[in-house]
Image (spheres, rainbow, N blue to C red):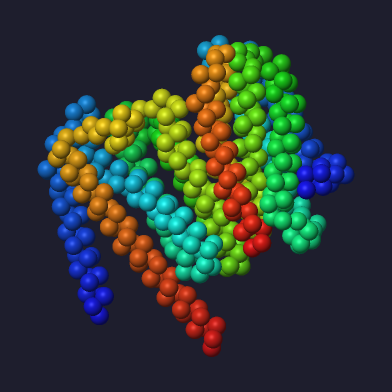
Amino acid sequence: MIEKTTWSIWHWLLGAWMLVVVYGAFFYAPTAQGFVGESARIVFFHVPQAWVAVLAFCVNLWASLRYLARRDPLDDARAAAAARLGLVFCVLATLTGSLFAKVMWGEFWNWDPRQISIVILLLVYAAYFALREAVADEERRGGLAAAYAALAFVTMPFLVFVVPRIYFSLHPDTLINVRGEIDMDGRMLQVLLAALVGFTGVFIWLYTLEVRVARVLMARRRREENV
Amino acid sequence: MFAKEVRSELRARVAVNAIGLFGLTTLVAVAYQIGPYQIHEQDRPHLLAALLWIILFFAALSGLQRVFVKEEDAHTAKTLRLAASPLAVWGGKLAFNVALLAALETFLVPLYCILMRMMVQGILPLIALLAVGCLAMAATATMVAAIIARAAGSGTLFAILAVPLMLPLLVMLIQGTRMAMTSPAWGDILPALQGVGALAGVTVVTSIYLFPVVWHD
């Protein structure tokens, strides 16, 4: 009961926090210089979505390695849940990035190295689910999917950091650029950091829900097997 | 393990035939349809580098997946598990795939340069890139081949899993080849060479830890 109340309070706090983030993104943060109109405000949604996607893939790796070490089916469910959410946030980051590209450069898709990188990342984790579908045996599925997840994860730094720097990119400098400096107005930075915290909270909430559903389904299956 | 792989391949020659003929057929089709004169001078380095690696990449995909699938098909995988340590199996299969890919590159790259009139300024940097690229591609393909051998529909699954994993590698290889075509200096090809080398290294190290899990699953 206490746990339920605590969760309920957290959800309300998260909702309030996200409302503040949305308000801050449109009314508190100033208009950025060097961008068309108000297009730069998308940074408060696009960057946290990309961050959460990377975080989700990190959680996927953690759960996969845990599964390989302990062979607990719940760890496999955790890995799948994280990868699923990672894919969702990856799609959202791609869509918001495309909107920004349309406003800034006139086209939704410019074959920019960062756009290509994120699409490859989507394909890599979509393949993770194709592999899961192709293996019927649960334990073998968990093991193979975990191995693939680890292999997929090692390519991620190359997609996120190496490939976009080999080719010329239209993409604005990342938050922490090659000079190691943050080129952002103080109030914009405050809203961006708040958005990063808020989106991380949304991820934790959705991830917890997915894991709870998986736990319930597993318990039901165990009961059915015992009957 | 490597000698066993070579002996087994010399008996049936399935992978050699698949890789060689796929590569040759694609090269002939590209040379016939595009040829050396259909590309503007300023586009040559980029297009020729991209076409070369697309031919090598898809030819490699047609043969590299067989290393583990053939053991499952012939029902020899269980015996292999008892007869050799996982690392020996992985090392042998990787060495065989590297040899197969190196043979394909030795045969196809000079032929491609002749047919497409591809002039390379930095021959040594290109050879280094081909060697490191060969190791990176073979390492990824070997590990994915081990995974798909234990799943249903392994043929199609190999392409679904391997192509996205190899795309960053392909991007860096195309960029490196382009630089080798236009400049003899090692410094120009170095970023791509470092990227490919790093990817090869992390894939090999990750595979050493993951392969025993996949092999005994």
Task: Decide which of B66, B215 is in the foreground and name it.
Answer: B215
Q: Residue furthest bottom?
A: A227
Lateral position of residue B198 relative to residue A49, left or right: right
Q: Residue furthest left?
A: A28
Q: Quadrant of residue A138?
A: bottom right
Residue that appears at 59% across and 52% down: B209
Along the horizontal axis of the image, is B177 left or right of B145? left
Residue B67 visible, this angle = yes
Q: Residue at x 31, y 62 (%)?
A: A205
- Image quarter hosting the C terminus of chain A: bottom right
Query: What percent of the width, then of the height, locates residue A35?
Result: 23, 29
Q: Observer-nearest residue: B201 or B77?
A: B201
Q: Is residue B139 above or below residue A55?
A: above
Query: Could you tell me residue B123's position as x and y percent?
Result: 64, 17
Whether residue A135 is situated above or below residue A169 in the rendered picture = below
Q: How many marks?
A: 0
Q: Is residue B71 left or right of residue A142?
A: right
Residue A98, image x, y percentages: 35, 38
Q: Position of residue B175 (x, y in %)?
A: 53, 25
The quarter of the rendered structure image containing the N terminus of chain A is bottom left
Q: Residue at x 15, y 46 (%)?
A: A24
Q: Residue visible at 56% across and 11% down?
A: B41
- In the figure, A219 relative to B133: above or below? below
Q: Is residue B152 something one can see in this rendering?
A: no
Position of B125 relative to A181 (above/below)? above
- Please tell me in which quadrant of the rendered image residue B169 appears: top right
In this view, the residue in front, A87 or A178, is A178
